[in-house]
Structure formats: C-alpha cells, structure tokens
Amino acid sequence: MSIKVGDQIPDVNLQHKTADGVESVSSSELFAGKKSVVFALPGAFTPTCSAKHLPGFVGLADDMKAKGVDLIACLSVNDAFVMGAWGQDQNVGDKVMMLADGNGDFSRALGLELDASGFGMGTRAQRFAMIIDNGAVTLLNVEQPGAFEVSSAEAIMAAL
C-alpha cells in the first residue's frame, strides 16, 4: 500500500553529495519542521527527467520558496555521486537538493517503487511529487505509467 495524504514520512536514510563528500540524512529529520516539496523520478540523466522534470523545479524554485516552501528535493534510485553529477550538469546550485535513494529503501517504504527491470533499470521510484508539511504528506501526485503531468513543477506550484 502506498503512502497517502495525512501519513507521516517514513524514517529512512537517504544520501546527499556535498562538497565534503556523501552525507547520510534521515528522512524524518530532513522533513521535520518545514514545508518541503519532493519530486521523484525513475533516473538521473534520463530523457524526460533531464529535459522537463528537474528543470521545471529549478526554474520555479524561487517562486515556490516565495510561497513558503523551505526545501525542494529531487529523489531518484541512483547513488549520491550520480545525483551530484546530474545536479551539476543541470545547474541546480542550491535550488534543489539532490537526494539519492541508492537501494530504493525510501521508495519502497512509501510504496511508490517501480519495476523497471524490463528496461534494464531494476527497481526505481515511480514518477511522483508530494508536499510535506512538518513530516506529514499534504499532497501526493503520482503519475500514470509513461505520463508527465501531475508531478510537474507547474502542477505543484498551482497547488501551493
């Protein structure tokens, strides 16, 4: 069963590449006491993710923060080095935190994993976006397979 509006975010360790190396961060601590937007996608450097999903959130980051969002995070089942390199490639800067769910533990705990083994990608995160307020999900938009609509930056911006 997948997470739903009103549920608390599960406590799972995620990784984030910093200038000092890879930092492990607890999801429950990361999202406590703040309003966060988290969007997940099947993979770094993949076509829709690189051309539309991540760039949309980078482009609207300042507008989201002006509406009270404290943290915008991009999550993928990739390692922290790949997420860091992708963030550099996409000129993310400090607008979007690039979170690595290397083993898919967070995606699985949310019930939002995706079997992409048919594409040679193993288990990944479904494409989704959520708003989290002090650790509780207040909005959850999960895409239908192959779609890119409800998890876009524009859709989340409209919901803020």
Image (cartoon, rainbow, N blue to C red):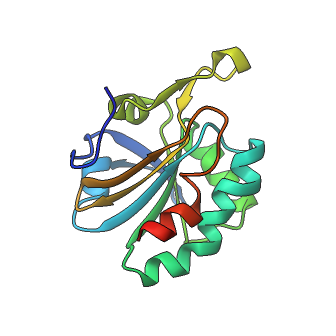
Q: Residue at x 22, y 62 (%)?
A: 134
Along the line of sight, the residue nearer the viewer: 82 or 76: 76
Reply above or below: 52 against 159. above
Task: Say whether residue 19 is visible.
Answer: no
Q: As drawn, which residue projects farthest toward the bottom?
A: 66
Can you give x and y, in whole percent of width and height, for residue 120 in the image?
71, 18
Reply above or below: 131 against 68. above
Q: As drawn, which residue projects farthest toward the top?
A: 118
Residue 33 is left or right of residue 62, and the answer is left
Can you give x and y, in whole percent of width and height, for residue 50 in the image?
73, 52
State how many labels appear: 0
Q: Residue at x 51, y 34 (%)?
A: 102
Q: Residue at x 58, y 66 (%)?
A: 154
Task: Say whether residue 8 is visible.
Answer: yes
Residue 155 is left or right of residue 58, and the answer is left
Point out the image quarter for the N terminus: top left
Residue 2 is left or right of residue 38, and the answer is left
Can you give x and y, in whole percent of width and height, for residue 84 in the image?
62, 53
Reply above or below: 45 against 108. below
Locate residue 127: give its quadrant: top right
Along the line of sight, the residue nearer the viewer: 61 or 89: 61
Reply above or below: 3 against 93. above
Can you give x and y, in whole percent of width and height, for residue 99 in the image?
49, 50
Point out the image quarter for the C terminus: bottom left
